[in-house]
Amino acid sequence: MQGTTHELWNIRFVNRIINSMADGVFTMDAKGRIASWNPSMERISGYSAKEALGSTCQLLQCSRCFGKNCPADIKKCKIMDQGQSEVKECQLRHKDGYDVPVIKNASLVKDENGKTVGIVETVTDLTELNLARKKAHEAALRLGEIHCMDNIIGKS
């Protein structure tokens, strides 16, 4: 049975929103296999949707999920117990082998009967923010060197 025109429009609209987001968004099915992967996930991770679909999130080698490295088995992932993850700053491994600083969040998706049907995760790339933080810190240090002399602060 085909959906109504309105339902199909809503699906297209939601897909357009997800695909236009700056944050990476991906979903996994109840078995922990990646079912969708937006263009921002491609940019952040280096993996195309074609490469990611059907894989587990182990592909990203995230560090510090729930305070630990992510398990390879969805049944061992604490999101299954907790329902959602804490929003955490962590690192994921880019396809080219370097770490990308991100904020990661995940939530279970349940059907109307409360049965888990999947997981949705969002990933925010912190690379630019961390570079700005570093530049601000370096500027503050340089400013301190210019205006400090043995605990004497001066400005002319």
Image (spheres, rainbow, N blue to C red):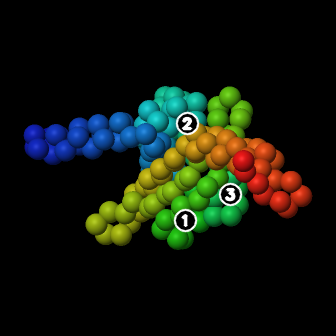
Q: Nearer the viewer, residue 86 or 153?
A: 153
Q: Nearer the viewer, residue 114 or 137?
A: 137
Specify the label residue 64 is tagged with.
3
- Label 1 environment density (alpha carbons within 10 Å; few <14, some 14–19, many ≥20): some
Q: Quadrant of residue 4?
A: top left
Mark 3 touching mark 1, by CB under 8 A? no
Q: Is residue 151 above or below residue 22?
A: below
Q: Report, in whole angstroms, how far the alpha carbon at label 2 lies from the one at label 3.
A: 18 Å
Secondary element type, mark 2:
helix
Q: Amino acid at mark 3?
A: Arg
Can I make out residue 111 in this image? yes
Alpha carbon distance from label 2 to label 1 = 20 Å
* Helix, strand or loop status at disc 1: loop
Residue 31 in the image, given as x and y percentages of width and height: 50, 52
What is the spatial separation of the Cα atoms under label 3 and label 1, in whole angstroms? 11 Å
Q: Is residue 90 above or below residue 125?
A: below
Q: Which residue is mark 2?
A: 44
* Residue under label 1: 86
- Please report whichever mark, 2 or 3, sits nearer to the chain's N-terminal start: 2
Residue appearing at x 55%, y 65% in the figure: 86
Coordinates of residue 108 in the picture (x, y in percent): 44, 61
Category of crowding for the residue at label 3, using alpha-carbon neighbours closer than 10 angstroms: few (below 14), some (14–19), many (at least 20): some
Above or below, 52 against 104 in this view is above
Q: Residue at x 72, y 33 (%)?
A: 97
Q: Please state which amino acid type lies under the numbered disc 1.
A: Glu
- What residue type is disc 2 on? Ile
Q: Is residue 92 visible?
A: no
Quadrant in which the N terminus appears: top left
Element type at mark 3: loop
Give whichever of discs 2 and 1 has the lower sequence position. Answer: 2
Residue 93 pos. (x, y %): 67, 40
